[in-house]
Image: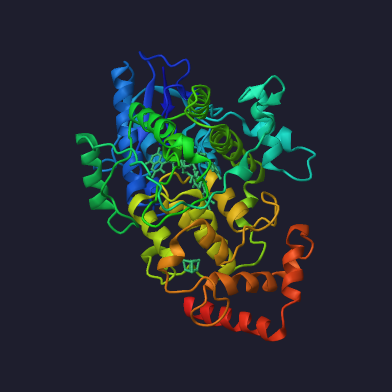
């Protein structure tokens, strides 16, 4: 009797629990490319190509390590298009008495897997997902009894538990968080290193052709394609970040420069989220660089906080709050997503740059996602379902467990403050301070009203005014309402008129 060990497309690591205790003589390792996963939302072409190529390379590595691997290619004429159909085919061909799989990333997928036991009438064992440092159960325990789930306190516990950047019981440098040092505006004379670029091999070329043929109506540019698709290549990408970018990661973490999509960020979320890299190895690499004097503490602490803090925290929130979390709409926002989120056809330069780079790279860095794209969706009152779907489609690192809390919780405040203490709403002045986008914009960031004024300026006040009832008890926005209340009636009317004119045109 054999065990079918299913490896999902985002579980591409030999240490994954579903491979523990695997008997290469009897067990079959299964990877399935299926149409239902590629189209439950219409993922960016580059995202599909990346994942399929990484899956095919991983299958090859498993074969070379002596395992029996069943791999369903999407363009195999016999491919049924669904996990159920593919498992059915494997069961029909082999004498299998059990299915083993590591806990999936998404709630949707968990429900699907839970239905298999009765569908196939054999045991289905779901093992913990060891690609994370904190299990959903541990997070429930941490959250239990807390009024507010603040990332900072969660992060400190993880630092202590894993002894990360610790000096006994104290944080190295005497501070847990160096964020205040990490908000430098961009300098004009920065020489930003070239990003990691992998050259596609024959296997990747085959995938690119297939994706080009079959998903031509999906968003995004398929080529050039430079993602790492094996663990070895992903480690190279990580090393390059540590050597060339980490030292300035902290200083310019929030900065945005026209035509510079990569800045000093790590560009490893795609690899972490599909298993090619693991969180602790990234953290250790950064700490080693700190001890070797290659990167300052503000950069290293900032980087590890993203990985062992934010990343683990949003996953914990996701599993704690699902399934209800995906339905939240605190501000009752109903506006349709504007077309320019797909076409980049807008006069607002910050949005045009961010959407264009997203289309080309299936990547945008955090501040573009939060303070340009997310901020606009928040201020314009775009329906959270549509915003979530867009973010899930367009980024190569997007899976619901990480995308949903970042969009619903952090960018849109659609959860009413379960994740963030106040909405990340801002006028054009923040974007102007942290980028050079405004210089080449048809709008004027210093103008507050009128046809040439930066739309973020009036939309910001209009958002606060529209949502006063919902935000009235939030102490962190009280000051802004005081400022609004001091405005003359004519100014308030101009804000309303400009916003209405702009938003009507948007629809
Ligand atoms: P860096 O800035 O170099 O950070 C290093 C690593 O820290 C990242 O690779 C990532 O693994 C982790 N990290 C940083 N911030 C976060 C965060 N807020 N949540 C989780 N992990 C974090 N990240 C995704 O992985 N997938 C998503 O679908 C996604 N959607 C987002 C949507 C919005 C609206 C916002 C505001 C953020 C989103 N993020 C998402 C978080 C963050 O923007 C990306 O992780 C980051 O931009 C990835 O690029 P990087 O590897 O260069 O990150
Ligand atoms: C994202 C994705 C895509 C596009 N295709 C597949 C696939 O064909 N087969 C597969 O096993 N996984 C795929 N994935 C990743 C899954 O969507 C992911 O494993 C679940 O959403 C759980 O996180
Ligand atoms: Fe964006 Fe306003 Fe600056 Fe234009 S002026 S780039 S719309 S913030």
> Which quarter of the frame holds ligand 2?
top left
Quadrant in the picture for residue 6: top left
Q: Looking at this view, is 198 or 122 the one in front?
A: 198
Position of residue 442 measured from the top left corner of the image (x, y, whole percent): 42, 74
Residue at 73% of width from left, 33% of height from top? 141
Q: Looking at this view, is 96 or 263 the one in front?
A: 263
Q: What is the quadrant of the N terminus in the image?
A: top left
Q: How many marks?
A: 0
| Scheme of colours in the image | rainbow
Q: Looking at this view, is 19 or 250 the one in front?
A: 250
Residue at 36% of width from left, 52% of height from top? 44
Q: Is residue 234 above or below residue 367?
A: above
Tell whether 133 sits left or right of 45.
right
Position of residue 134 measured from the top left corner of the image (x, y, whole percent): 62, 30
Quadrant in the picture for residue 3: top left
Tell me if I can see residue 318 in this picture: no
Position of residue 237 measured from the top left corner of the image (x, y, whole percent): 37, 33
Q: Is residue 431 above or below residue 485?
A: above
Position of residue 218 measured from the top left corner of the image (x, y, whole percent): 33, 57
Q: Residue furthest left?
A: 202
Q: Residue furthest front?
A: 189
Residue at 50% of width from left, 49% of height from top? 366
Q: Residue furthest bottom?
A: 490
Tell whether 56 sits left or right of 373.
left
Tell me if I can see residue 399 in this picture: yes
Residue at 77% of width from left, 65% of height from top? 472
């Amino acid at each position: 009797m054999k065990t079918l060990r299913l490896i999902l497309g985002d579980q591409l690591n030999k240490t994954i629990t579903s491979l523990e205790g695997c008997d290469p003589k009897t067990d079959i390792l299964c990877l399935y490319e299926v149409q239902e996963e590629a189209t439950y939302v219409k993922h960016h072409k580059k995202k599909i190509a990346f994942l399929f190529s990484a899956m095919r390379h991983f299958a090859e590595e498993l074969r070379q390590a002596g395992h029996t691997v069943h791999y369903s290619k999407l363009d195999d004429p016999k491919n049924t298009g669904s996990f159920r159909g593919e498992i059915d085919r494997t069961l029909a061909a082999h004498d299998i008495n059990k299915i083993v799989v590591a806990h999936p990333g998404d709630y949707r997928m968990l429900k699907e897997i839970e239905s298999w036991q009765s569908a196939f009438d054999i045991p289905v064992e779901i093992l913990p997902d060891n690609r994370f440092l904190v299990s959903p159960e541990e997070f429930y325990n941490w959250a239990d009894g807390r009024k507010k789930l603040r990332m900072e306190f969660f992060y400190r516990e993880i630092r202590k538990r894993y002894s990360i950047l610790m000096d006994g019981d104290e944080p190295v440098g005497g501070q847990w968080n160096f964020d205040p040092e990490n908000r430098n505006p961009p300098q004009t004379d920065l020489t930003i290193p070239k990003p990691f670029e992998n050259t596609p091999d024959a296997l990747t070329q085959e995938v690119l052709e297939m994706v080009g043929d079959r998903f031509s109506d999906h968003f995004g540019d398929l080529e050039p394609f430079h993602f790492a698709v094996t663990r070895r290549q992903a480690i190279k990408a990580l090393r390059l970040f540590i050597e060339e970018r980490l030292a300035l990661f902290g200083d310019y973490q929030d900065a945005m420069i026209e035509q510079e999509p990569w800045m000093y960020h790590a560009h490893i979320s795609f690899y972490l989220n599909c298993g090619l890299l693991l969180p602790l190895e990234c953290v250790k690499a950064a700490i080693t660089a700190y001890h070797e004097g290659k990167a300052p503490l503000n950069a290293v602490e900032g980087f590890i906080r993203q990985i062992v803090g934010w990343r683990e925290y949003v996953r914990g929130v996701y599993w704690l709050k699902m399934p209800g979390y995906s339905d939240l709409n605190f501000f009752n926002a109903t506006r349709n997503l504007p077309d320019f989120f797909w076409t980049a056809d807008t006069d607002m330069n910050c949005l045009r740059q961010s959407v264009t780079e997203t289309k080309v790279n299936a990547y945008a860095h955090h501040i573009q996602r939060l303070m340009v794209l997310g901020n606009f969706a928040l201020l314009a009152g775009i329906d959270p379902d549509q915003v979530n779907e867009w973010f899930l489609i367009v980024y190569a690192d997007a899976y619901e467990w990480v995308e949903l809390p970042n969009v619903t919780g952090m960018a849109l405040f659609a959860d009413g403050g379960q994740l963030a203490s106040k909405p990340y709403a801002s006028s054009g002045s923040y974007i102007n301070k942290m980028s050079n986008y405004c210089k080449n914009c048809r709008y004027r960031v210093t103008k507050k009203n009128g046809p040439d004024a930066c739309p973020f300026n009036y939309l910001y006040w209009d958002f606060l005014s529209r949502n006063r009832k919902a935000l009235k008890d939030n102490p962190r926005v009280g000051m802004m309402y005081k400022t609004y209340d001091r405005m003359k009636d004519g100014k308030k009317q101009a804000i309303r008129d400009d916003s209405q004119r702009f938003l009507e045109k948007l629809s």
